Amino acid sequence: MKRFFPIVLLFLLIPIIRVSATTIIDGDLVKTPDSPDVYIVKLVGTEKYKRLILNPEIFNQYGHLKWENIKAVSQTELDDYTTSDLVRAVGDEKVYKLYPNSDIGEKRWIKTAEDFSGFGYKVSAIYEINNFERDFYNSGAELVFTPITPISPIEPTIRTTPTTLYVPSDYSTIQAAINASIDGDTISVGSGTYNENIVIDKKIKLTSNYAAGIVINGGGTDNAITIKNSDISIQRFTIKSKDKYGIYCETGSVTMKNNFIIDSGWGAVAENNCQLTLLNNLIYNNKKADNKDGAGVLIKDNFSYNITSEIRNNVITDNYHGIWSENSNIKVLNNIITKNVGGVGSVESVGIYHSGLGKSDSYYNDVWSNGWNYKGDALAGNGSIDTNPKFISEAQRDYRLQTGTTDYSPCINTGYPEFIYNDGTLITDNDYRNDMGAYGGPDNIGWNP
């Protein structure tokens, strides 16, 4: 498979000219400062379009496009432009709709002019591309518009085969894609901030390509994500909702992997009959605005349902409490839990707390410099340490571990020693033992800091 990790880094490192949106003209290149995605602007009368340039290999095939000419705009300014994914190669009559997928993508030919009109597409939205770019994309099924003819009250066909739904290409909001999905579907979300209070009640996978560039913001009016009676996987998002829950699950199960769970009253919450699995997440700054309560992880009243929630290879820091559990079984393994120091609450802040029925199994964690490291009946298990993890830069929220020959992190190669927990980039019995924290363990592949 073709891989583009250095190309993505190149997009992140390009020089940016910061200008006002009023200076944007037809053909300009634009991007937001915190996303690797570069767009080319098209202005037709009062219509404003933007088209994603999939990767630098395509960018470099256009001699008139210059890295130094890319202009930075805010997310609000970028959202003023309608995303277009309609293209036609110079000298080719075929018009294609593009479906970005990682750094490769897929093109689907809109077969006739009638199909084009039937889908409601606009000619003004078509971008001209060169033959290299056209041939770069994989070819998908032709797009043929089938009009709905209301000739009889026949029940509509219900889709039964799982597929991938794209946001915003197919649906403008994540909730709209969820509403249209069926069990087994994958919802792939593109770059941007989605100000939504999402409710999920289906067995689906919610994913993106770059956690720092895709934000689900509940806005403090409700939880960012609420899960009801579903089995769901959520991977590579930034999730937050001031004073509310980032993730709330009451029934079902949820696996969270490679996410930023931040800036909420409570980060990830599981109550009653919900089994929570947290793998390789950064969980920080979850506390109430008055700094009297809050937690990175809150698990309550799951004991009677015979389930165990697993919290493995996360960094949980700078919350009011780190992990707070009551009447539940939890397994806490290979985490770094540090500096969870609440402000003025009546309950003293703690790294790991457990009380009531059930138990807290805690092994091979670095629990350091919290208000209390452990409280209730939570205890430090085998392999646990209490020392400065030595992150690269706490001030910049860079929670990767310091390496080197002398001043390196004590969390390197100190995770649970069984081979199944080895770092995911390592594949033999002779490879190094896993690191504690979000960048170690078998699920660290594809994680971006």
Image: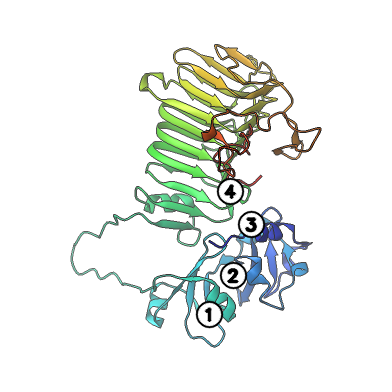
- Residue 414: give its label: none
Residue 333, compared with residue 152, is above or below; it is above
Residue 171, compared with residue 297, is above or below; it is below
* Image quadrant in which the C terminus is located: top right
Query: Disc 4 and disc 1: Cα gap in Å?
Result: 33 Å
Would you say 319 lies left or right of 93 here? right
Q: At which x and y percent is residue 368? A: 69, 22
Q: Earlier in the sequence, mark 3 or mark 1?
A: 3
Contact? badges 1 and 2 (CB < 8 Å): no
Query: Disc 3 and disc 4: Cα gap in Å?
Result: 10 Å
Which residue is disc 4 drawn over? 446
Q: At which x and y percent is residue 317? A: 66, 29
Helix, strand or loop for disc 3: helix
Query: Disc 3 and disc 1: Cα gap in Å?
Result: 28 Å
Helix, strand or loop for disc 4: loop
Query: Disc 1 and disc 2: Cα gap in Å?
Result: 15 Å
Q: Earlier in the sequence, mark 2 or mark 3?
A: 3
Residue 437, compared with residue 32, is above or below; it is above
Residue placed furthest toward the front: 430
Disc 3 residue crowd, few under 14, some 14–19, many 20+, Cα 10 Å: few
Q: Earlier in the sequence, mark 4 or mark 1?
A: 1
**Does residue 358 appear anywhere in the picture?**
yes
Closer to viewer: mark 4 or mark 2: 4
Closer to viewer: mark 4 or mark 1: 4
Q: Give the residue drawn at x 65%, y 15%.
A: 348
Which residue is disc 2 drawn over? 49
- Residue 88: give its label: 1
Helix, strand or loop for disc 2: strand
Query: Disc 4 and disc 2: Cα gap in Å?
Result: 31 Å
**Does residue 125 appear anywhere in the picture?**
no
